[in-house]
Amino acid sequence: MEHGLREIAQPMNIQNYVLGQWANGGASEYEAKHAITGASLGHVSSEGLNYADILAYGREKGGTSLRAMTFPQRGLMLKALALYLQERKEAYYAISAATGATRVDSWIDIEGGIGNLFTNASLRREFADQPFHIDGAPVKLSQNGTFLGQHIMVPKRGVAVHINAFNFPIWGMLEKIAVNLLAGVPAVVKPSEFTSFLTEVVVKDIIASGILPEGALQLVSGKGHGILDAVERGDTVTFTGSAATGMRLKAQPYFLERGVAFNLEADSLNAMVLGEDASPGTPEFDIFIKEAAKEITIKAGQKCTAVRRVVVPADHLDAVQAALAGRLATTSYGDPSMEGVRMGSLATQLQVERVRFSVEALAAENEVVFGRIDGQGEAKASDPLAGAFFAPVLFRNEDPFGKQSAHQIEAFGPVSTLMPYRSLEEAAEIVALGRGSLVTSFVSADLDAARQFALEAAYSNGRIHLLDASSAKESTGHGSPMPLLTHGGPGRAGDGEEMGGMRGVMHYLQRVALQGHPNTLTAVTGRFTPGADRPEARPHLFRQHFEDLRVGDTVTTAKHLVTLQDIEDFAELSGDKFYAHMDENSLEGTIFTGRVAHGYFILSRAAGLFVDPPKGPVLLNYGLETCRFTKPVYPGTEIGVQLTVQEKIDQEKRSPEDIAKGIVKYYVEVTDDQHEVVAVATILTMVKKINQG
């Protein structure tokens, strides 16, 4: 599907995708307008939609299909979707320009969102090859090991309702659905009506791809009034937007009375703090100015992570003001399609009014040191009055403890306030006056100061970004939440948590404790539980292809008598001549009663016992996942091994020429002649499949 400015220049209804079809709402709820030209882009409405039916459709249609898939299958689904959208990204850039975004702004939204799909797809390797997650190791509940416990986490039988903000119409959707889809939970996405015209275009491509099962994703493009009335126990509601709106939603009875999970990620008063060592002329001072200016102007300041407070040593306040104002003065703003423009517009004229109102409130007790209260300036555009333009504004607050408005009022645009501190403890206190932030950056080359500030400020932040010259080149920046790290923050920031790798996925899973015999737990989880039966493999495990291997099948090996010569030879070969292995006169005061065999010799000799050498389906040793040496082994001890199929993980072919294969985890248990375990390990092998198609 091709999209472009030519198409959106002709207004048409921005549709909803619900109950398996594209649908218009009733009367117009909002007329979307081009942020640069003011031209109409179409009308938005979700009036008349039946949300009870929509959410039920997601739970039953989408949820059933997703829960039938394993984690690796869901991960591959996300990967396929990311590749599909990546091929179409240029079309999204064309339409993103209508939100007032520059190419860089759009890159964050478009490719940041697609990158989130890729990253979450890679998490498939962290989960079992099952529709559920096996959480941790078995827990022994009885003396003889016939009664154990095991936690598992299964997909919730609900739907994720994502209420997103206007500033990231693509990233906001993709970063959230990537997590719930990987978990096996369907989503209903309600973007802001201000920029839902861009979200709609991406969803149209997603639906056209056929990659997601029907019902896994639905779109409500309008205001969505009444959508929360339909939520039920097992559903999860996420909200991204203003703290005030988020808190009002959080107080609704749906979440307490019906047991509906609610996650709030709210705009917050984030800060950048300059270290006392970073004086003018140092690399860190220059890095600070560059990063602060970028975070004030990128997305025209319309980011939940944007820098609202610039906190610097009192001695450097004037220097920072001059340098930061100078950099802002060279930042051309206006129509991103014009040469030299580096900052675009706000998303709507309504946002201009809201930012101006907040700036006027801040000006009541803070000095304007750059820009104008009304946000007027020299916007580079064919018609500056038609666009939602607002020039950067920088305030100065000499008394951050006495004058509190900069810690309370957020102007959601290119607006920030300078303020001084006199000690690192005071800097952390100033940051905390914002009552909870998504992120604070600390720029310093002083490692002790970085440690002190990070630990002092951590309680009031969701993320601490520590920046210096050694990391600046590769740093993802103050304002960039990363998929494998949590995104959220305490207090005003919402007390929520998004993304975070496996942590984020678990928000959509229900943990349950299983209890039973190891045989039962093995049967339920599909993973060998120590203590379960170990039928002897016929033929040897190394002679079987991936499809033929069964969890629990075991090879019981011949025995090996450990000798002093073994210890001498291994020490010479490995170079490991640790005293406990080589010097019996140095053992006083240790736990050893004689020269002890190397743990890695025991593991290596175990491999020699269980490996079946001739060429077969086993392609290679893929690694060692866990290893414990539980009892010393002395010369004269006879050891034996049981090699058991613990778990099987299917692998996708990377190309048509690639070998079809899977990863097999083996539980290795080494015992001595008193039938006591001396070593346990989990090893991974890559095993060829019979079917190479």
Image (spheres, grey):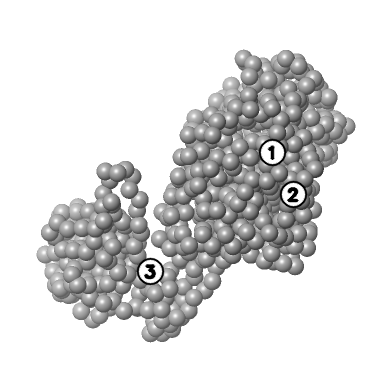
Where residue 462 sits: x, y (%)? Answer: 63, 48
- State the mark number for residue 527: 3
463 or 114: nearer the viewer: 114
Position of residue 301 in the picture relative to residue 77 (left or right): right
- The residue depicted at 35 percent of the width and 65 percent of the height is 647
Q: In terms of sequence position, does the residue under pointer 2 or pointer 3 come before the other?
A: 2
- State the mark number for residue 224: 2
* Alpha carbon separation for disc pair 2 and 1: 14 Å
Position of residue 414 in the picture relative to residue 538 (left or right): right
- Is residue 112 visible in the rendered image? The answer is yes
- State the mark number for residue 14: 1
Where residue 607 sits: x, y (%)? Answer: 20, 63
* Alpha carbon separation for disc pair 2 and 3: 44 Å
Where residue 631 sits: x, y (%)? Answer: 29, 72
User: Would you identify the image quadrant in which residue 27 lies?
Assistant: top right
Three-letter amino acid code at the position of disc 1: Ile
Where residue 653 sits: x, y (%)? Answer: 33, 48
Q: Residues within 10 Å of mark 3 (few under 14, many from 20)?
A: many
Q: Say if mark 2 contacts mark 3, CB within 8 Å.
A: no
Three-letter amino acid code at the position of disc 2: Gly
Three-letter amino acid code at the position of disc 3: Arg
- Nearer to us of marks 2 and 3 is 2
The N terminus appears in which quarter of the rendering? top right
- The residue depicted at 38 percent of the width and 69 percent of the height is 527
Element carrying mark 1: loop
Q: In terms of sequence position, does the residue under pointer 3 or pointer 1 come before the other?
A: 1
Q: Residues within 10 Å of mark 1 (few under 14, many from 20)?
A: many
